[in-house]
């Protein structure tokens, strides 16, 4: 028996869809729920810090773990090193893909559509608000985010965001491809010395539909060892 | 069966028994007699009648297979059976109990005259999930069934015919009445000469399942390679592809395969049943093929190229060695409802896949570098699966949902295991012998009717091919230790090298999508943000060109992504035409395919001291 799968497409769309996470988080900077805690001090990828990144991509039950290191002291094009892929020496293809994906320039910050605000949950200790982004503030490459809603979970005792989430409200088109499910959440930590949010963990779930087949993937990004 | 005047070749006479005048022989009283009516289709369902031989016990069950050989996934064909009833001789009904979707228990079996039921097709019931995903229940299309009244029928027999408990060894007579205009492609021999009925006799139930038949308007090609007859039947939903288009390449390939295999292959006839799906939502989605002893049922997608057929058939035909000629008891005494899986998928699928690549370089269909690149791609792809998993363990448990997802690695790592084993044997014998020799020895020791014990395969290989071969299998196949491919390839003089590989889809290059949709989502437009897409530059495709047709196939506004498939796996230099609408004007852009390339790891020959072993590996 033999079957044919178009793996290349799955990878390609996965790569594009990660924009959901980035754009939703970049929007946080513009969010003024607690101006002193958020504001422009929110930096999701601190480019002046070195750190380790563990990327786990699971497609249909198969898993691949890539370890990378970001060295802020190096010239921009040399900052990423791919250390291993499933404990093995990474291949040229894996290195290229990882560097491209994580070395991407962030999208220009998007604006929140003020009319879209909702308080989802208001309980002692926890506040969850949601919003959508203003389509006019998105660029062609991340325009699909207009169909997603973002959720922020805030610890009301500290006034800090602990989780940022984004969920698609209807099937998406990423480039020309159909993505019935795309949701991501990011866990953040507040760094008191820097007065900044640092990323802790991103989790992106996606289902792609192509050529009559659906393929589900999960990408987990774990950040550690932040050093200046 | 009807011999149509469209049949292109005299060679067909040997295969298509329809032209041989015969009357049905008498049939043993012990036979299970099945009649299948393809003429009176009842809302996409086909009526089947089964007359059992006289039943000796009071209670008997009739079973549809839970699984069939070669698929490695639960199918539950009984799910597609409706309105099943049992009757006595006088026409009155007998009580039955359906204990699960596959099992029908008949209480007073001694009085059973016949069973009657309706069969639904599986193509119509495919869900959009990947049939190899953990939870999928979809039957892989090449193992499925299709009922399209008056036009097309695919009968993978497991979907139409079952067996009575402990009566798998009884002979079967299968009579099929079909519309006169449809021609049946199969490796079976028709026992009668009527235009609208076919009668097939098969010695046992596993043989029934092993013989698919496809009814379609005559579109066939036939040829002879040495003493083997090959029959190709094609049905294309869109009517775009014909057997005559595919025949030259198929023939060239089968000839090369036969030359490569030599006397180890003694197949007398081989039928290729090709269904070409429109790719629509209501059509077959499982692209690929399923091997049988004397045929293969394959499902392609439009636009189908001769190359697609070659990819698939080169693999399926090599199954005539493993598992068809050398296999374990798990396969020989296949339990259709409580299957035990063999631990040697690396052997059945891996060696088959490796040979389907090796023979191409061996026979000069591709050059050495192309062969290294194929192997290098398999190394890269194998990293998408669990690389530390014992392959024998995976194999034994492949029906478990968690393990099912590892299955496709049999085509990647499985083939690489075979490659390394081949290199080990070459090294040990100073190039004199290789994996094909080992397969010849094994098929002499065993054979189609003499299975091996699953546990004895590796010890026997060790005995025949030596300790180095045995150690390799124990370490890397049984214990699942990673394979240092570069070390094995160094034995035959190869060194790691980064080389350009063609990107698979011309619409995506270096992670940039060169297509977009318009705001109404009814058109696909070219997106040309830069000049680096060589395919576009070469044809002169410009930004905002609306794609209308690609190689003569119109772009479906309901499924814009279908264009992606049209630009997938194209051949460098092959002719291409793209019709676009540019600012209100229709333009046809014609030229040859220029692919985009991206660097990736491969190997190149670089050790003259290993030349002899290298030559033996690729050319002996
Ligand atoms: Zn196979």
Image (tube, coloured by chain):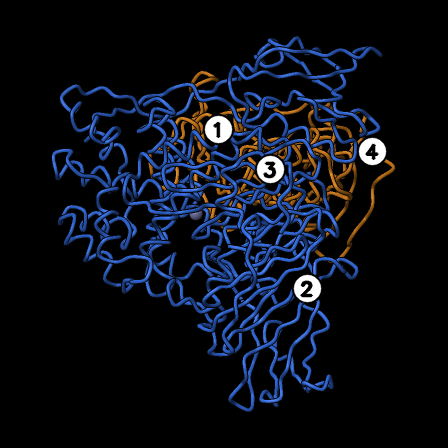
Q: Circle 3 is placed at which residue position?
A: B7
Q: Is label 3 or label 1 in front? A: 3
Q: Is label 2 or label 3 in front? A: 3
Residue B152 x/y as whole percent? 69, 48
Q: Chain of mark 2?
A: B
Using the image, determine if residue A119 lies above or below residue B10. Answer: below
**What mark, if any, has residue B249 been given in the picture?**
1
Using the image, determine if residue B359 lies above or below residue B290. Answer: above
Q: Nearer the viewer, residue B548 or B129?
A: B548
Residue B515 x/y as whole percent? 68, 22
Q: Residue B164, can we see it?
A: yes
Q: Circle 2 is placed at which residue position?
A: B119
Taking B409 as reference, is B25 left or right? right
Q: Circle 4 is placed at which residue position?
A: A113
- Viewport quadrant of the C terminus of chain A: top left
Asked if the residue under mark 1 is in contact with the one under mark 2, i.e. CB atoms within 8 Å, the reply is: no
Residue at position x 15%, y 46% from top? B468
Asked if the residue under mark 2 is in contact with the one under mark 4, i.e. CB atoms within 8 Å, the reply is: no
Q: Nearer the viewer, residue B587 or B619?
A: B619
Q: Secondary structure at mark 1?
A: helix
Q: Is label 1 or label 4 in front? A: 1
Residue A28 x/y as whole percent? 70, 35
**What mark, if any, has residue B117 been given in the picture?**
none
Q: Colour of chain B?
A: blue
Q: Chain of mark 4?
A: A
Q: Chain of mark 1?
A: B
Whole-number angstrom distance, CA of label 4 to CA of label 2: 55 Å
Q: Colour of chain A?
A: orange
Whole-number angstrom distance, CA of label 3 to CA of label 1: 19 Å
Q: Residue A160, can we see it?
A: no
Q: Is mark 3 within 8 Å of ligand 1?
A: no
Residue A141 position by quadrant: top right
């Amino acid at each position: 028996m033999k079957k044919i799968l178009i793996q290349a497409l799955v990878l390609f769309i996965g790569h594009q869809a990660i924009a959901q996470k980035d754009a939703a988080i970049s929007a946080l900077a513009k969010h003024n729920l607690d101006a002193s805690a958020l504001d422009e001090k929110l930096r999701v990828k601190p480019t002046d810090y070195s750190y380790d990144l563990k990327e786990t991509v699971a497609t249909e039950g198969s898993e691949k773990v890539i370890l990378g290191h970001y060295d802020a002291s190096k010239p921009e094009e040399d900052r990423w090193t791919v250390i291993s892929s499933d404990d093995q020496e990474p291949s040229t293809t894996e290195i290229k893909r990882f560097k491209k994906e994580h070395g991407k320039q962030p999208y220009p910050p998007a604006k929140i559509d003020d009319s879209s605000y909702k308080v989802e949950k208001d309980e002692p200790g926890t506040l969850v608000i949601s919003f959508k982004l203003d389509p006019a503030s998105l660029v062609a490459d991340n325009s699909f985010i207009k169909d997603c809603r973002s959720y922020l979970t805030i610890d009301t005792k500290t006034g800090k965001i602990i989780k940022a989430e984004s969920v698609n409200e209807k099937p998406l088109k990423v480039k020309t491809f159909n993505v019935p499910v795309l949701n991501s959440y990011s866990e953040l930590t507040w760094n008191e010395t820097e007065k900044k949010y640092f990323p802790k963990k991103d989790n992106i779930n996606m289902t792609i539909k192509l050529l009559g087949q659906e393929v589900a993937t999960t990408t987990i990004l774990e950040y550690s060892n932040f050093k200046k | 069966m009807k011999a149509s005047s469209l049949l292109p070749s005299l060679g067909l006479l040997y295969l298509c028994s329809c032209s041989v005048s015969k009357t049905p022989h008498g049939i043993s009283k012990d036979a299970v007699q099945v009649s299948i009516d393809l003429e009176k289709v009842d809302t996409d369902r086909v009526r089947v009648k089964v007359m059992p031989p006289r039943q000796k016990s009071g209670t008997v069950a009739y079973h549809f297979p839970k699984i069939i050989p070669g698929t490695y996934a639960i199918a539950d064909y009984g799910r597609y059976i409706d309105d099943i009833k049992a009757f006595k001789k006088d026409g009155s009904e007998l009580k039955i109990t359906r204990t699960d979707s596959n099992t029908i228990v008949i209480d007073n079996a001694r009085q059973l005259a016949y069973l009657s039921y309706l069969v639904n097709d599986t193509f119509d019931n495919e869900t959009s999930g990947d049939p190899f995903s953990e939870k999928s229940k979809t039957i892989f299309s090449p193992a499925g069934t299709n009922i399209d009244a008056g036009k097309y029928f695919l009968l993978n027999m497991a979907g139409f015919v079952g067996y009575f408990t402990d009566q798998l060894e009884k002979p079967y007579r299968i009579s099929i009445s079909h519309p006169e205009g449809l021609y049946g492609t199969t490796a079976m021999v028709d026992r009668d000469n009527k235009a609208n009925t076919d009668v097939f006799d098969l010695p046992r139930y596993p043989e029934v399942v092993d013989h698919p038949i496809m009814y379609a308007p005559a579109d066939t090609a036939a040829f002879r390679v040495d003493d083997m007859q090959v029959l190709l039947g094609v049905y294309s939903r869109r009517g775009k592809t014909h057997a005559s288009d595919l025949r030259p390449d198929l023939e060239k390939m089968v000839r090369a395969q036969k030359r490569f295999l030599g006397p180890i292959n003694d197949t007398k006839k081989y039928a290729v049943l090709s269904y070409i799906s429109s790719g629509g939502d209501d059509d077959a989605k499982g692209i690929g093929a399923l091997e049988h002893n004397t045929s293969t049922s394959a499902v392609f997608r439009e636009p189908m190229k001769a190359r697609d057929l070659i990819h698939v058939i080169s693999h399926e035909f090599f199954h005539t060695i493993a598992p068809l000629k050398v296999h374990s008891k798990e396969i020989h005494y296949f339990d259709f409802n409580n299957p035990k899986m063999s631990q040697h998928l690396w052997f059945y699928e891996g060696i088959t896949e490796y040979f389907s690549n090796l023979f191409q370089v061996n026979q000069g269909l591709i050059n050495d570098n192309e062969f290294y690149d194929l192997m290098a791609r398999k190394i890269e792809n194998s990293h998408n699966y669990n690389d530390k998993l014992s392959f024998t363990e995976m194999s034994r448990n492949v029906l478990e949902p968690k393990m099912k997802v590892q299955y496709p690695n049999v085509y990647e790592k499985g083939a690489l295991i075979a490659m390394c084993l081949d290199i080990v044997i070459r090294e040990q014998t100073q190039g004199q012998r290789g994996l094909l020799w080992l397969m010849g020895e094994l098929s002499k020791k065993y054979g189609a009717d003499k299975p091996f014990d699953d546990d004895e395969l590796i010890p026997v290989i060790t005995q025949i091919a030596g300790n180095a071969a045995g150690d390799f299998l124990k370490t890397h196949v049984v214990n699942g230790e990673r394979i240092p491919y570069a070390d094995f390839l160094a034995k035959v003089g190869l060194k790691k090298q980064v080389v350009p590989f063609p990107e698979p889809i011309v619409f995506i290059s270096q992670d940039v999508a060169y297509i977009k949709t318009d705001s109404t989502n009814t058109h696909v437009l070219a997106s040309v943000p830069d000049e680096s897409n060589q395919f576009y530059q070469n044809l002169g495709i410009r930004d905002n060109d609306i794609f209308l047709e690609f190689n003569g196939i119109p772009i479906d506004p309901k499924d814009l992504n279908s264009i992606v498939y049209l630009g997938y796996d194209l051949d460098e230099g092959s002719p291409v035409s793209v019709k676009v609408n540019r600012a209100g004007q229709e333009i046809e852009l014609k030229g040859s395919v220029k692919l985009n390339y991206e660097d990736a790891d491969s190997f190149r020959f670089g050790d003259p001291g290993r030349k002899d072993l290298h030559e033996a590996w690729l050319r002996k």
